[in-house]
Amino acid sequence: MKRPNISMPGSKGGGPSDPILKTHKLLLEIFSEVPMPVASTESSRTNAALLGIHILHLLKGCGLLNGTGFHSAAVALFRPMEDALDCLAAVSMVPGAAEKWQNGKLKASDAAKLWTNLVNDVEARNMPLSEYRKCLRRDFNTYSHCSPDLCNWNLYFKPFPDSSNKGTLELNQVPYIIDSNGHSIDAYETAHLLELIHVVKEAYSHYLSVQKDIFYQLVASEGEVEKIMIQHDKNPCHEVRMPPEIAGLEN
């Protein structure tokens, strides 16, 4: 009999050897040390650590929500995750940014301009880094509000038991894990985690040049996470501008 592509909440979690979880743990250790970033001020040191822990909590919270079937709640964290990454990068790498952020005078969009100007020769998804970060904030802005785009992550397709390809869209009220939506959110989180690693390597380059063991662990973790991302890219699973469960019905 045909059945929806759904799973029970909590059935998709990884174990302690999972590369994503190991990377989270390593980054937590780094931020907990409150090392001095390249911006080289006491304000940048303390505020970068504060932002780093915040990002890890957002990532962990997004994953927990996603793994229990609360997909729209997980997606609602996408824009805050991007904002936090831009603020962390600016505060840790740009002199004076930490003081502005601490005093409430640095918006995430302005933070993005500050730090991407330092490394704008770098490309992401075949576009300049500054343009890539701008596109992410634009695409996820709709998820920052109570829009249909956000709430549609809670719909899954229930096929009729006959031989047709027809069915109904059901509200995910249990909730179940909607397999395609959950996988896509996982892929986005993987991409975000990779970007966080890249920022940490730049922001704490001096610290990592001394703490060789931690640096080698971070490089190894980055390689493991990149392998996962390569698999996601083949589909691409990380396309989250529309719930894949619904997008698949239109093909």
Image: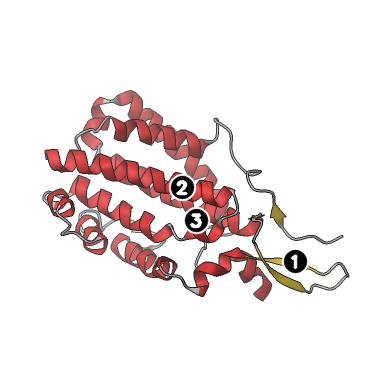
The mark that comes first in sequence, 3 or 2, is 2
Q: Which residue is mark 3?
A: 74
Residue 38 in sight in this render: no
Measuring from the top left, give residue 18's x and y in whole percent. Answer: 55, 35
| 2 and 1 marks in contact (CB < 8 Å) | no
Q: Secondary structure at mark 3?
A: helix
Residue 153 in sight in this render: yes
Residue in the picture at 61% in, 70% down? 247
The circle on residue 231 is none
Which three-letter amino acid code belongs to the residue tagged 2?
Gly
The mark that comes first in sequence, 3 or 1, is 3
Residue in the picture at 31% in, 46% down? 199
Q: Which residue is mark 2?
A: 61
Measuring from the top left, give residue 10's x and y in whole percent. Answer: 63, 44
Measuring from the top left, give residue 233's x and y in whole percent. Answer: 53, 55
Which three-letter amino acid code belongs to the residue tagged 3?
Ala
Position of residue 170 in the picture relative to residue 14 (left or right): right
Q: Secondary structure at mark 2?
A: helix
Task: Report the residue that reaches farthest toward the front.
Answer: 173
Measuring from the top left, give residue 237's x and y in whole percent. Answer: 56, 58
Residue in the picture at 64% in, 48% down? 9
Which three-letter amino acid code belongs to the residue tagged 1?
Lys
The circle on residue 158 is 1
| 3 and 1 marks in contact (CB < 8 Å) | no
Position of residue 168 in the picture relative to residue 232 (left or right): right
The quadrant of the image that shows the N terminus is: bottom right
Residue toward you, 218 or 250? 250
